[in-house]
Image (spheres, rainbow, N blue to C red):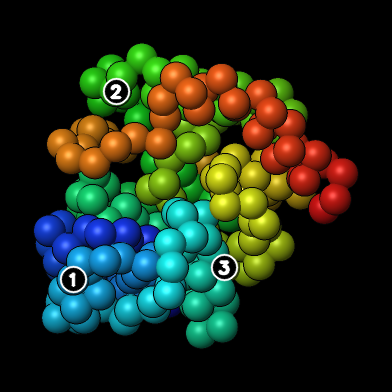
Amino acid sequence: MRTVAVIPAYNESSTIGSVIDGTSRYVDEVVVVDDGSSDDTAAVARKHGAHVVTHVFNTGVGGAVRTGYQYAIRHDYDFVVQVDADGQHDPAKIPTLLDHAEDADMVIGSRYLNESIEDYPLIRRLGITFFTTVVRKLGGIDITDVTSGFRVYRVSALQDILHRSDNHWAVEQTLDAAQRGQRIEEVSIEMPIRDEGESQFSLDTLVLYPLRMTDTVFRVLLFR
């Protein structure tokens, strides 16, 4: 079983080194997708032994992880482990995700299966719940945390669900996987909220969710 970790990173020079060090203990290769950073993210990542793929400009997390997925597909890996660069995801939990992946096509680390979600702001929890509810209803799957970025994919299944939208890539991928009958599991993973940086969830983005979700749903249900 050959495994590669994909770490999307944008201006994460202060945390990327320790994330790589922790992650590399559990996978065969670590790939950092430097998404147009203006700091030393790429240099620090290389210093810590990661293979770095650099975007000339910032595409967002969706674009960065897609680049990482394509790398895994081209290099014939069996599983992709996705880890955030900010230190929110504990690399020591990777073996747990990989154990569940032996009988699944997608494994999602869920904050809703433990108490760590209670530390998140209300707006962010509302956003996660909104997306998750839509995917549960349309995909007919029992999940709790569709926006979680701590995941494992079986590469042979991942090839069928490469997302086109960068705004809500996790929602699109998970709904597409459910529609295709792929095996999706969740595992309880505690994820403390990061101390620095801004969340993608705000009151403004919450108001735009219905419009953006309509685009994502049509993309999967009508054009796949």
Is the residue marked by circle 2 packed among few (<14), some (14-19), or many (20+) residues within 10 Å?
Answer: some
Q: Secondary structure at mark 1?
A: loop
79 vs 133: above or below: below
99 vs 3: above or below: above
Q: Earlier in the sequence, mark 3 or mark 1?
A: 1
Q: Secondary structure at mark 3?
A: helix
- The x and y percentages for residue 173 are 62, 49
Tell me if residue 221 can be seen.
Answer: yes
Q: Earlier in the sequence, mark 3 or mark 2?
A: 2
Numbered label attached to residue 62 = none
Quadrant hosting residue 88: top left
Q: Which residue is mark 1?
A: 40
Nearest to the eye among marks 3 and 2: give it. Answer: 2
Determine the CA span between mark 3 and mark 2: 31 Å
Numbered label attached to residue 120 = 2
Determine the CA span between mark 3 and mark 1: 30 Å
Outermost right residue: 222
User: What residue is drawn where x is 39% and y is 78%?
Assistant: 53
Determine the CA span between mark 1 and mark 2: 29 Å
Outermost top residue: 122
| Contact (Cβ within 8 Å) of mark 3 with mark 2 | no
Three-letter code for the amino acid on which mark 2 is drawn: Tyr
| Contact (Cβ within 8 Å) of mark 1 with mark 2 | no
Tell me if residue 100 can be seen.
Answer: no
Q: Which residue is mark 3?
A: 155
Q: Earlier in the sequence, mark 1 or mark 2?
A: 1
